[in-house]
Amino acid sequence: MPFLGHERGRAYYRHWAAAEPAAAVVFLHGFGEHTGLYHRYGFALNAAGIDLWAVDQFGHGLSPGDRGDFGTIEDSSALAEQLTDLVAQQHPGLPLIAQGHSFGAIVTLFRLLDGAARYRAAVVSGAPLIPIPDLLDADTSFDLDPAWLSADPFYVDSLENDPLAFVASDSTALTRELDRGWDRFGTDLPSLSVPTLAVHGVNDPIAPIGAVRAYAEQIEALQLVEFAGARHDVLNEVQHRDVAAAIIDFIHRSY
């Protein structure tokens, strides 16, 4: 796999290439995941003429770091920026879409709020916009039940048997960086100006949809599409085709 250089080491990335791309998505995954879990999504985008570029964040996949330790929001943002630079070099003028899932959604929103004007639009999924109760106590261990994430047996099997995926690790770094997001969003998120689509499972037990609904009602740039019965990893849920179709429609309307 190709990689991006960073002071923490080589961060590996994947590129699902459309034959003649009309837009490109730069994607950041969530806790316990890696880019290889998103091949179905990549192929769906490719069929619609959209490139997908995704990087294994630190502590995940093939990239270095203690298991589950993303580092800081700035570390992940730097990876997204490097990947974006690479896309822009290979496809000058191609419309760029920022996307993130779960913790990746937090990083993506930080980047948009900090003035990432190079993106035509953005997509977030499973965005934890308010504190997660399980991360508020003193116990730094974080152990997810795969059933909280998806009802898709193929995806759950991947989480349970893929050596690069996991559902448990120390959450010290994750909690620290999520706290920064939660502290900021109440004040700054209403100023979001980049057109952003939030796709979210109605039955998400990790990042309850109520917070996203509330923000979508007050932020003109934020649009919410809900998926009944879907859980946290909505891009890899039973309804993954419908989720991808909603994202593709949004992207096509963004350029």
Image: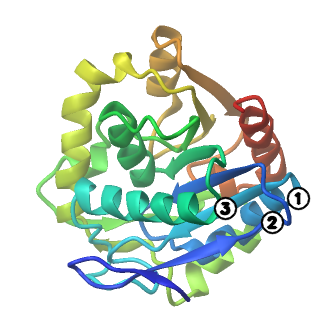
Nearest to viewer (mark 2 / mark 3): 3
Badge 3 density bin: few <14, some 14–19, many ≥20, Cα 10 Å: many
Q: Tell me the quadrant of the picture where the N terminus can be found.
A: bottom right
Looking at the picture, tell me which residue is in the foreground, 137 or 213: 213
From the viewer's perspective, is 181 left or right of 50? left
Label 2 to label 3, Cα distance in Å? 9 Å
Query: Which residue sits at x=45%, y=86%?
Result: 62
Looking at the picture, tell me which residue is in the foreground, 11 or 205: 11
Residue marked by disc 2:
43
Q: Is residue 148 above or below residue 141?
A: above
From the viewer's perspective, is 79 left or right of 34? left
Secondary structure under badge 3? strand
Q: Is residue 234 above or below residue 188?
A: below
Mark 2 and mark 1 in contact? Answer it, CB < 8 Å. yes
Residue marked by disc 3:
52
Query: Which residue sits at x=50%, y=44%?
Result: 205
From the top left corner, tell me how far across and down residue 64 is, in percent.
32, 85
